[in-house]
Image (spheres, rainbow, N blue to C red):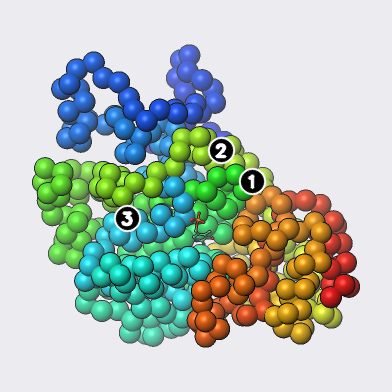
Amino acid sequence: MEENYQIETKCIQSGWKPTKGEPRVLPIYQSTTFKYDTSDQMGRLFDLEEAGYFYTRLQNPTNDAVAAKIADLEGGIAAMLTSSGQAANYFAVFNICEAGDHIVASSSLYGGTFNLLGTTLKKQGISCTFVDPDASEEELSAAFLPNTKAVIAETLSNPSLVVLDIEKFAHVAHAHGVPLIVDNTFATPINCRPFEWGADIVTHSTTKYMDGHAMAVGGCIVDSGNFDWEKYKDKYPGLTQPDESYHGIIYTQKFGKLAYIEKATAQLMRDLGSIPSPMNSFLLNVGLETLHLRVPRHCENAQKVAEYLNANDKVAWVDYPGLRDNKYHALAEKYMPNGTCGVIAFGLKGGREVSVSFMDHLKLAAIVTHVADSRTCVLHPASHTHRQMTDEQLIEAGVAPDLIRLSVGTENVKDIIADLEQALENV
Ligand SMILES: *Cc1c(COP(=O)(O)O)cnc(C)c1O
C-alpha cells in the first residue's frame, strides 16, 4: 500500500520502492525470464500459490512498478500495463464478457475504440449498443439488455471533447448491476479521477499525456476494487466460477478485491499476450514523473489558444470545454475544476478543404497521427484516424467532417498562436 501523499508526490514517488542498496531509479528488468533454485519453487508460482516472477509475458518488475504508480495516481487497488491503449480497452471488456454478451458504450469515442467495440468484438460474439452520452438516465436505461455486462465511455472523448457525466453513467450502470469502465486518457488522473465519481474500472492509452513525449505506445487498466462481482455471480462466471485453465481457481475467492486484475494477468495476458516491453515502461515512468507539471501547462496554453481561435473571423466553431460558451463547460467545472486537456477541436469557415489547406500551412504545429505530447500537433480525423467511417458515422461519433484536432503542446503559447495566425492568413 502506498503512502497517502498528494498526487504531485505520487507522480514521482509511487511505484518503485528501493530498499537498502537498491538502485534509486527504477531499473529496466530487460529479461524475459527469472531464475529459481528448485523446481518446486517455480511450480508454486505456476499454481499462483506464491507471488513472484517467472516469465515477462505474465509479470515483470519494471512493468509492475509502473502499474503500481498508475494505480496509486487513480486511487485504484491494482493495475496492469498493456502494450497499447487498444489492448487495454480490449482486455478491460473481454475480462468480463464472452460470446453472447452485450455492452453499452458512449458513441463519442476514439475511432479505434469505436471499431473495436462495434466491429471486432462483434466478430467474437460480443454486441454493443452505442448511446448518446448526453442522453437522460431513462434513455440510457433503454439500451440495457438482460445480457449486458459493462458500460464503457471516455472522460473526455477523443477527438470530440465531450465531457462525460460520470455520475450519471455510473448510476445507470449500477442500477443494472454492471460496472462502468472509463477511458481516462485525455483527462489523466491529474485533472480527473473517475473512481471518485463512481467509475469501477479505468483504462488509459499511456501513449498520450502519461508518456507525454511521444516515445512509447502503451496502455493500462486500473481497478477500483469497488465492483462486487460475487453479488452478480451468474453474470460474471469468468471471475466467480472455476477457471479450468488454472486448475479450477475461482478468482473472487482466491484474490478477493484483486480478482479482476489477477484474472486479466493470469488468463488474458497468458493467452493473448500484449505486454509492454520493460524499456517502454521505464520511459513511461520518466513521463509520469513530470505529469503533474506538464498537464497544467498544456491546459493553460490550450485555454489561450481556444480563446484566440474563438475570436478569429476565419474560424467557424471551436470546441474546448474550458470556453464559457461550450456545451460541456459546466460538466468540466464539476469533474475537472483544474482544467481539461490540451486538445482543441475546431473547424474553419469554408469547410473540409479549407481545414486541410490550413493544416498544410502550419510550420511549428506538425501533422502527425498523435495527440497529447509536448510538441504541438494537428490531425484531420475525417482524413486520418476516422477515415474508415462514413460521414453519417462521423456525425454520430461527434466528429464533424471539417474538424481539426489541435493538440496544444508545452511550447511558449505566443509561438503556437503566431503559427496558427500565419497559417490562417495563408488559407
Ligand atoms: C489513443 C487512444 C486510444 C488507443 O491507444 P493506443 O495507445 O494508440 O493503442 C484509446 N483511447 C483513447 C481515448 C485514445 O486517445
At label 3, the amino acid type is Asn
Q: Quadrant of residue 367?
A: bottom right
The residue beneath circle 1 is 213
Could you tell me which quadrant the N terminus lies in? Answer: top left
The disc label shown at residue 283, or none: 2
Asked if residue 407 can be seen in this view, the reply is: yes
Residue placed most toward the observer, 64 or 276: 276
Is ligand 1 less than 8 Å from the beta carbon at label 1?
no
Image side of residue 4 versus residue 368, left or right:
left
**Distance between the alpha carbons at the discs numbered 2 and 1:** 9 Å
Mark 1, secondary structure of its residue: loop
Q: Is residue 256 left or right of residue 310?
A: left
Mark 1, Cα crowd under 10 Å, few <14 / some 14-19 / many 20+, is some
Position in image of residue 345 (x %, y %): 66, 71
**Residue 189 visible in the picture:** no
For numbered disc 3, what is the local secondary structure?
A: loop
Mark seen at residue 226 = 3
